[in-house]
Amino acid sequence: MANKTAKSCKFVVVGGGIAGVSCTEQLASQFPSEKIVLLTAAPLIKAVTNFKKVSKTLENFDVEEQPCSIIERKYPNVKVIQSEVKQLQAKEHKLLTENGKELHYEKLCLCSGGKPKLFIHDSPHVLGIRDTDSAQELQKRLSKAKRIVVIGNGGIALELVYEVEGCEVVWAVKDKAIGNTFFDAGAAQFLIPSMGADKPERATTCKRARYTTDRAAPECDEPNRNPGSAEKLGSALGPDWHEGIELRGTQEMSHRVHVEYQCEVLKVYSAEDFLSSPQRSPDPSSDPGLWPVYIQLTNGKTYGCDFIVSATGVTPNTEPFLQGNNFTVAEDSGLKVDDHMRTSEPDVYAAGDVCTACWEPSPMWQQMRLWTQARQMGWFAARCIGADLLDEPIELDFCFELFSHITKFFNYKVVLLGKFNAQGLGQDHELLIRCTKGEEYVKVVLRQGRMVGAVLIGETNLEETFENLMLNQMDLSAYGEELLNPNIDIEDYFD
């Protein structure tokens, strides 16, 4: 007897985040008569809106959470199924879902993202920030909190410590400076005064549309039967994830942040365990009051707090696909992909956080699991799937020529270009820096007289000029430090 739950379709995309949705939309546009299934664990998908091409490689966009029905209405050939993956049988070109579906595909693209890299598991006092549900849980817990401890030094940690109000924040970072993923120590010093400054008034309207979902509501085909799964594998937060949610504690203060540098978590204690622990010391930082949880750091300090936020990054979410298959996995646990976004399994592609780019990269590009690259990889994976299906040649997209990223930290516009932190250059580089306190921080990375990277903080208006100088590889040796002379209009100079 035929399996009534089995479906056959040309394309299946796994993941309702930016990479998966970008891939799905491109496939739907390119093949309007072919059936496409988008499989997502979360009740909402993430879509790119207000997309703007800033320059040749720089792009800016908003991320909007949408019910699945919106993409289905926009593209009649797309069907969204809400469920987790149970098993992939790559040789049979078959995908089994947790809610009993059997999907047969011709081409499959895995865009399952990453999962929080928690420093401790199964603790009710540790909250990992990754998806929309965890952000809402953070808001709920903060409303009753006087002090929290944030662990991590990446983008979400940077945004969180700045946004939280009415609650003391202890921020533990393993590096010598904040934002080590994005900045050098000089840029960190430029930003630090903003942590204690009054924040500008926020606009009353939020630029992201918001939707509420009933998990039993038929927004997608076959709602997930496991109500806890969306929390575990929901799509990652958008670049403006804190917009529209109030991150406020119980205190009257605006925001107070204390940073503990060069330390990691040694141990987490419940209140009972801490009070009975022989290692307990009269450290004033732990306070005499009774806190729900205590955290001991490797620098010897102990803090009591209401809860701990783990913002220590993500690991590629490959687990549902590995058993019984022959994927080649990179050292960072991502699925290795070539310059056509193909994995080692036939007809299986991958894009976004779940994959690791294993082609020979451009000298000024590196993979960082960021929103811009998730969109680029998802879109390019769809183009590659189409090219392979039609037996057409396709070149690596120009977006992989130069690393570029626009974001905002501490209310400053931040642009990162090329080898912005001199990644992989060793001692073979020099730096030029221009800093105006409270206004801008400009850092240029030069190698053999040619610009290979830059960090721009503030409204510098230099991004397009610097992008061109990197792409053209013009010899700038003759200009020396005059390159960053504020009295010279560099944009006109190199036009």
Image (cartoon, helix red, strand yellow):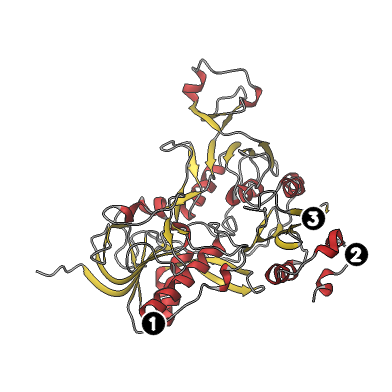
Residue located 60% across and 36% down the image: 147
Do tag 3 and tag 1 residues touch (Cβ < 8 Å)?
no
Q: Which mark is residue 31?
A: 1
Residue that label 3 marks = 432
Quadrant assignment, res 31? bottom left
Quadrant assignment, res 192? top right
Where is residue 143 drawn, in percent x and y? 56, 44
Q: Which of marks 2 and 3 is nearer the N terminus?
A: 3
Residue located 56% across and 68% down the image: 400
Can residue 71 be seen at all in this image of the molecule?
A: yes
Q: Secondary structure beneath disc 1?
A: loop
Which is in the foreground here, disc 3 or disc 1? 3
Image height check: is 51 above or below 141? below
Residue type at mark 3: give it.
Leu
Q: Quick one: quadrant of the C terminus?
A: bottom right
Residue located 49% across and 51% down the image: 130
Residue that label 2 marks = 487
Which is in the foreground here, disc 2 or disc 1? 2
Residue type at mark 2: give it.
Asn
